[in-house]
Amino acid sequence: MVFWAFFISGLIFLGAFYFDEFTPLNELPGAPSVYYYPEPNLGVVYHKPSFSLSYVEEYELPEWVCYSLTVEMLNKEKFERNQDFEPDRDIATGSGHYRDYKSSGYRRGHLVPSADMAWKKKAMDATFLLSNIAPMRASFNDGIWLELEHNVRDWARRYEQVTVIAGPLFRDATTTIGENEILVPRYFYKAVFAVQNDDPMVVAFLFDQDQTQPGALDEYVISVDSLENLTGVDMFSNLYGSWDDEIELEQQATIPKGEWPFNERWTLQRMEKQRE
């Protein structure tokens, strides 16, 4: 009886958390032994090669994606992209389809950037599954969202490792695209955690993709505490070292001096595109 109780419990666990060629964090180049991802709020957690996501069937989108990026991953030889966007057949309820985006006016926007996973072919290919994609305006996807992706890679090189959580907000969104009725989010967020000289650091951003002329990145900094209230997701729990650190850092709505420097080159590059 005890054996069957454990067996049934195991089946229930695997039904909620799907593992697909998952690379634990301790097997990533240069990473520590603990793999982190937040608890789901609305979705079901699926593990992909080197990242995780919480998929919400109602919206055919993930509520969050989460991964760690190390300087060793960035320094490895890069694989060339040879993967098209595909439905994620591992999603128990079925994911969106690439046809949903056809003639919709929206890009297939990556939440986990393919460039961050280019160190491993299976990981990079997984970023093109529709479970990791959300409808984005071209100006947003190729603009400030891309600029932040560049900066995150810079920070991974600077701090040796960062942990990233990103996703859409479902509030204030009513438009859908395609036969699968994929929700078109108005807002997207990204939060980044790192440790410098044994001190934890965190920064979070919230963007309105309908904004036509985005400003500098630091204008979009939001406290992690506020972001948690908006998403219902507890971010970076147990990574801060102490409860006092967590409370203090998650209430920050500005970037402390010397932390999270922005690369001016990426800003100028974006501004030039905006003027075109």
Image (tube, rainbow, N blue to C red):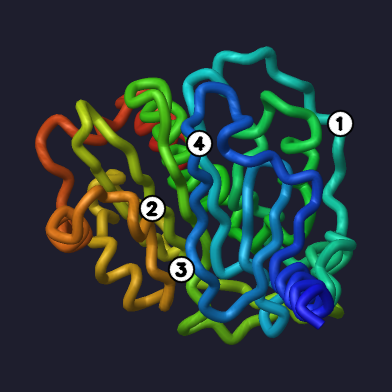
The kind of residue on which mark 3 rests is Tyr
Number of the front mark, 1 or 3: 1
Residue 122: percent from left, percent from top: 80, 36
Q: Is residue 37 left or right of residue 220?
A: right
Which of the two discs, 4 and 3, labels the residue nearer the N terminus? Answer: 4
Tag 1's secondary structure? loop
Q: Under tag 2, what secondary structure?
A: strand
Quarter holding residue 269: top left
Amino acid type, callout 1: Asn
The nearer-to-camera label among 3 and 2 is 2
Q: Any mark on residue 120, and which?
A: none
Q: Position of residue 80 (x, y in %)?
A: 78, 22
Q: Which residue is mark 3?
A: 187
Mark 2 = which residue? 191
Residue ID at (56%, 43%): 142
User: In the image, what residue type sits under mark 2?
Assistant: Ala
Do residues under tags 1 and 3 come within 8 Å of each other at their CB atoms?
no
Identify the image quadrant of residue 189.
bottom left
Mark 3–mark 2 distance (CA, rounded to whole Å): 14 Å
> First in sequence: mark 1 or mark 4?
4
Q: Is residue 240 left or right of residue 30?
A: left
Is residue 113 in view?
yes
Q: Is residue 108 above or below residue 229?
A: above
Image quarter hosting the N terminus: bottom right
Mark 4 surroundings within 10 Å by alpha-carbon count, few (fewer than 14), some (14 through 19), many (20 or more):
few
Q: Look at 57% across and 38% down and name the residue there.
A: 25
* Quarter of the figure with residue 250: bottom left
254, 126: nearer the viewer = 126
x, y percent for residue 108 = 71, 55
Q: In the rendered view, tell whether residue 196 sits above or below residue 14.
A: above
Q: Which residue is mark 4?
A: 33
Residue 172: x %, y % from top left: 47, 84
